[in-house]
């Protein structure tokens, strides 16, 4: 079907654009400070970079945000912008993959794997941090996109039936 082919190509292009943007948006890389010493990520070993810049604990970022907001150590708009960006980013992917796959589990699985891939690339290239909470938010985002696809498909079927 022509629609599925167009949707799958559009989804692929969208995923590539997201991957390139997420990987290279923070270059040049700033210095990180830990224990009074400054480290440029390119000089850190990958294991040290992971130790300093990775969060593998689900929901940890949300608790960190909450405590930083309570202590007035972070601007609330930064937190909202970060969460909103991750929640919005994969909505088109969920919608387009819904057209192609039409199965919720497949759409969520593909989206979760790609979100994990994005985070891993950011970590390995030392361009950003790895955060499992970003993977969770992007997977939820794809679910929202699939829900929108499902609602649109249902309405279109009912309208064209009459």
Image (cartoon, grey):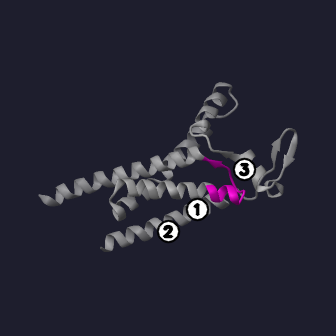
Going from N to C along the chain, the mark reached first, 1 or 2, is: 2
Q: Which residues are magenta?
A: 120-131
Q: Position of residue 108 (x, y in %)?
A: 43, 53
Work out which residue is located at the far left of the displayed protein and give it. 162
Judge by depth and name the residue closer to the eye, 56 or 74. 56
Left or right for 48, reference 119? right
**Callout 1 crowding tier (Cα within 10 Å): few <14, some 14–19, many ≥20:** some
* Residue 71 pos. (x, y %): 68, 25
Label 1 belongs to which residue?
19
Identify which residue is drawn at 66% across, 30% down. 68
| Secondary structure of the residue carrying numbered label 2 | helix
Nearer-N-terminus badge (3/1): 1
Discs 3, 1 touching: Cβ within 8 Å: no
Residue assigned mark 2: 13
Kindly report which numbered mark, 3 or 1, lies closer to the viewer in this rendering. 3
Q: In the rendered view, would you say 89 is above or below 63?
A: below
**Does the segment drawn in magenta span residue 130?**
yes
Give the quarter of the figure containing the N terminus: bottom left
As drawn, the label of residue 9 is: none
Q: Which residue is mark 3?
A: 50
What residue lies at 52% left-to-right and 59% top-to-bottom? 114
């Amino acid at each position: 079907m022509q629609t599925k082919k167009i949707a799958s190509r559009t989804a692929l292009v969208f995923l590539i654009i997201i991957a390139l943007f997420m990987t290279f948006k923070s270059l040049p890389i700033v210095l990180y400070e830990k224990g009074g010493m400054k480290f440029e990520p390119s000089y850190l070993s990958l294991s040290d970079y992971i130790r300093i810049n990775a969060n593998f604990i689900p929901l940890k970022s949300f608790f960190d945000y909450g405590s930083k907001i309570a202590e007035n150590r972070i601007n609330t708009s930064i937190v909202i912008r970060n969460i909103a960006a991750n929640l919005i980013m994969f909505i088109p992917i969920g919608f387009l993959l819904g057209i192609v796959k039409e199965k919720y589990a497949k759409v969520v699985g593909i989206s979760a794997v790609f979100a994990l891939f994005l985070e891993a690339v950011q970590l390995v290239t030392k361009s950003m941090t790895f955060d499992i909470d970003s993977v969770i938010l992007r997977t939820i985002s794809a679910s929202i996109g699939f829900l929108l696809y499902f609602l649109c498909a249902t309405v279109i079927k009912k309208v064209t039936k009459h």
